[in-house]
């Protein structure tokens, strides 16, 4: 079996605007839902128009001003791809304007030019865990069908503007997450009913398919994918009830991929909606729109979990409530580490969708120690990533078409769930403390050199 990854495999890292850029009100940027969860997406929702508070995210790692330095470090590691997102609120500060904010568009022009200068392919997410907060207060978020039109105006604007620079796009980050955190996902109140959440999700799915259509029209040589939180569940036991519950649990997130890749709602959801008295408003035009399907499937993968018919075994996790696997160890944040799970998931998704796959997030959040001599010895991160990449290579040898791998947070950034700085993912350390102090100086960790050698050897140095 080949030890080498394909020569056109895209290697790199993934970041998101609201976790790195900072400059949260600069150059006309509007308030986003992310700005209004200053302590992370599971923290309180705060109306920043009315409250004079600050958040570590306001400056983040100041990527807005320091991106040339960071991109040259990514280039030094040999990146051929960088996944980032556009902050919708830099382009349409309130979301419902007719004309975009030129200063916001100009920023991403400079950013993409900088990547291209280093031969780094931009992979751009249209909406990564944020939307204009104004659309939440004035329209009720994705609960209102009008938001589809606002989103597609934004998508059309950026496709037209960057059509010669960006040929790889994603619609909504971890679109299945809304079921667990509706404010961040679809701009809904946390007490919303399941029916309201699914209706908002439906609007988002329609918007996603309309964006796919626009992308295909405006940039015919581009590829556009979806983005799923790969929440792989294994049966906790071979008991048929547990095996069945696990299938249902996996349907809970695969459903999004089914709609986006096949163009219609799967029958298991029809039954689910009926049994839960959920009646969605789906127009004939919606059904027509949904037929425009994505070109590839992208997903994040950090951990696997177990499915069981016994709900009392669930433990409060970070994003999901999970049943732990007794055979796996966990990270400092309790995320269970399962490298074989990524091979399993790649095979499972490829068999299901028969479309190319892109791993757009994977990595280890850990506490790092900056030594007096400026080094950071993050062997635990190297081991985690080595073991996952070995399994990705196995999947490629199984025949799965994998377009690339962008590790999460190649540079330390602000964590999404709790806005923590101490939960570091990077190959590059950023001198920043939770209280906001720190010089923001960048340091190369041991994993920086390790990843560089993996990329330059096309994976041959993996153990
Ligand atoms: C994914 C998100 O859920 O996981 C990222 O797309 C996030 O935005 C990442 O940062 C890791 O989660 P956390 O909470 O450790 O930052």
Image: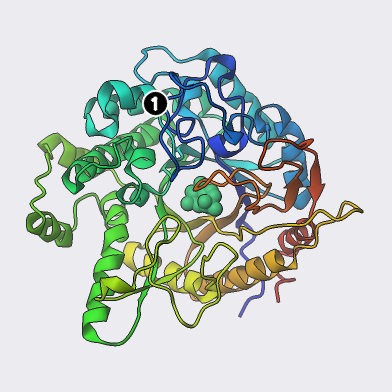
Q: Is residue 40 above or below residue 154?
A: below
Q: Is residue 318 visible?
A: yes
Residue 379 in the image: x percent, y percent? 75, 67
The N terminus sits in image quarter: bottom right
Q: Residue at x 54, y 20 (%)?
A: 105
Residue 49 in the image: x percent, y percent? 44, 19
Q: Is residue 397 visible?
A: no
User: Circle 1 — which element?
Assistant: helix
Using residue 224 as the reference point, say whether residue 271 is left or right of it.
left
> Which residue position holds label 1?
133
On whether ligand 1 comes within 8 Å of the CB at mark 1, the answer is no
Q: Residue at x 32, y 27 (%)?
A: 136
For residue 155, which quarter of the picture?
Answer: top left
As drawn, the residue found furthest toward the right would be 373
Q: Is residue 285 above or below residue 344?
A: above
Using residue 446 as the reference point, say whether residue 405 is left or right of it.
left
In depth, the one of 383 and 194 nearer the eye is 194
* Colour scheme shown: rainbow
Residue 44 in the image: x percent, y percent? 42, 38
Q: Is residue 70 above or below residue 335?
A: above
In depth, the one of 322 and 448 nearer the eye is 322
Q: How many circles with numbers are drawn on the protein?
A: 1
The C terminus sits in image quarter: bottom right
Using residue 138 as the reference point, say whether residue 72 is left or right of it.
right
Q: Is residue 240 above or below residue 167?
A: below
Q: Residue at x 80, y 60 (%)?
A: 446
Residue 201 in the image: x percent, y percent? 26, 43
Crowd rating for badge 1 (residues with CA inside 10 Å; few <14, some 14–19, many 20+): many
């Amino acid at each position: 079996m080949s030890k080498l990854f394909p020569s056109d495999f895209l290697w790199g890292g993934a970041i998101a605007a609201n976790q790195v850029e900072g400059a949260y009100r600069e150059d006309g940027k509007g308030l986003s839902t992310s700005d209004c969860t200053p302590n992370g997406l599971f923290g309180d929702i705060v109306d920043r128009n009315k409250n004079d508070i600050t958040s570590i995210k306001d400056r983040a790692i100041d990527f807005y001003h320091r991106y040339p330095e960071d991109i040259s470090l990514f280039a030094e590691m040999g990146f051929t791809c960088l996944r980032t997102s556009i902050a919708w609120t830099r382009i349409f500060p309130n979301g419902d304007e007719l004309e975009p904010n030129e200063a916001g568009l100009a920023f991403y022009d400079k950013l993409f030019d900088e990547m291209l200068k280093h031969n780094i392919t931009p992979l751009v997410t249209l909406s990564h865990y944020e939307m204009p907060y104004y659309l939440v207060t004035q329209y009720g978020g994705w609960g209102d069908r009008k938001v589809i039109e606002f989103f597609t105006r934004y998508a059309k604007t950026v496709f037209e503007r960057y059509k010669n620079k960006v040929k790889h796009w994603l619609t909504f980050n971890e679109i299945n997450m809304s079921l667990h955190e509706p404010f961040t996902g679809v701009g809904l109140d946390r007490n919303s009913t399941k029916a309201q959440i699914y209706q908002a999700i439906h609007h988002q799915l329609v918007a996603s398919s309309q964006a796919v259509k626009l992308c295909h029209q405006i940039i015919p040589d581009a590829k556009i994918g979806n983005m799923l939180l790969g929440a792989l569940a294994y049966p906790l036991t071979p008991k048929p009830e547990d095996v069945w519950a696990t299938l249902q649990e996996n349907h809970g997130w695969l459903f999004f991929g089914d709609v986006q890749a096949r163009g219609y709602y799967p029958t298991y959801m029809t039954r689910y909606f009926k049994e839960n008295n959920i009646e969605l408003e789906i127009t004939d035009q919606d059904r027509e729109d949904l037929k425009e399907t994505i070109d590839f499937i992208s997903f994040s993968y950090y951990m696997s979990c177990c499915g069981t018919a016994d709900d009392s075994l669930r433990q409060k996790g970070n994003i999901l409530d999970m049943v732990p696997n007794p055979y796996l160890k966990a990270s400092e944040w309790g995320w269970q580490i399962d490298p074989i799970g990524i091979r399993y998931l790649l095979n499972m998704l490829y068999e299901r969708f028969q479309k190319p796959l892109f791993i757009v997030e994977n990595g280890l959040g850990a506490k790092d120690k900056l030594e007096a001599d400026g080094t950071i010895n993050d062997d635990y991160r190297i081991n985690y990533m080595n073991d996952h990449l070995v399994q990705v290579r196995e999947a490629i040898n199984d025949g799965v078409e994998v377009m690339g791998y962008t590790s999460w947070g190649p540079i330390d950034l602000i964590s999404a769930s709790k806005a923590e700085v101490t939960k570091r993912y990077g190959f590059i350390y950023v001198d920043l403390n939770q209280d906001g102090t720190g010089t923001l100086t960048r340091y190369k960790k041991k994993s920086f050199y390790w990843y560089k050698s993996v990329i330059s050897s096309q994976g041959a140095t993996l153990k």
